[in-house]
Every structure is written in structure tokens, then in C-alpha cells.
Amino acid sequence: MDSLGDLLPPRINQLGLSSQLKAAYIVSQANLLAKGRFEAIHFTGGVLTVNCPSSMAAQQLRFSSQAILETINEKIKPYTIKRFSYRIKS
């Protein structure tokens, strides 16, 4: 009998869900590491879209984005976030 771990990846690829699952995984890991500074909401094409509570918080995130990206990318290997896209949550 095959294990679920052996059966699931081919079925996910067959259904075309691998990119959606990858994006969901990256968003969830980014939110775990965000510690309330931002909320990751979407990932596509190497760009992580984040909601910031204010323009000041977005600016602070922008200044420290390289270090934050390195931390997140270390956690989500082999995937990579290239940059942030910022939205101000109103």
C-alpha cells in the first residue's frame, strides 16, 4: 500500500494546485515571522504582497526589508521571495 506522502504530490501536480499550495505556504510562513509588523496576503512571481497598518509601518518595513526577506527566505527554502509589495491597510 502506498503512503499518503507518496500519493499526494503527483495528484497535486495533476490537479494544477502546486503553485497555489506553494503560495499559501509562503504566505503562512511569512505571517508567522511577521510578528504583527505586517500581514502577508498574496504571493506570486516572487513578490509577496503585505498589508501594513500605516504608512509609517510600511516605511519601516521598507528600510528593513532586506533582512526580513533573508529571514523569510531561509525559512521557506527552496522558494524565494524577491521583494515586497506594500499596501496600507485602512
Image: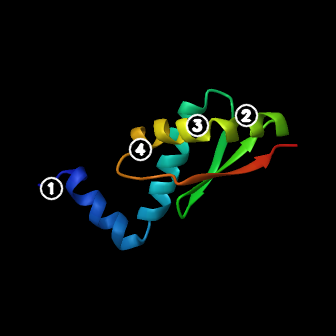
Dot 3 falls on a residue whose secondary structure is helix
In the rendered image, the vertical position of residue 10 relative to residue 30, given as above or below: below
Q: CA distance from mark 1 to mark 4?
A: 27 Å
Which of the two discs, 1 and 4, labels the residue nearer the N terminus?
1
Mark 3 or mark 2, whichever is nearer to me: 2
Classify residue 13 as left or right of residue 1: right
Query: Which element carries disc 1, helix, strand or loop?
Result: loop
Name the spot of residue 51 as percent of width and height, x first. Answer: 73, 44
For disc 2, the marked residue is: 60
| Residue 54 seen in this snapshot | no
Say which label, 4 or 3, has the lower sequence index.
Answer: 3
Q: Disc 3 marks which residue? A: 31
Q: Give the label, 1 or 3, closer to the camera.
A: 3
Q: Which residue is mark 4?
A: 76
Residue 85 horizontal side relative to residue 80, left or right: right
| Image point (69%, 31%), residue name | 37
Could you tell which of marks 3 and 2 lies nearer the N-terminus? 3
Q: Which residue is mark 1?
A: 2
The CA span between labels 4 and 3 is 12 Å
Which one is earlier in the sequence, the residue at label 4 or at label 2? 2
Q: Residue at x 49, y 48 (%)?
A: 26
Q: Nearer the viewer, mark 4 or mark 2?
A: 2
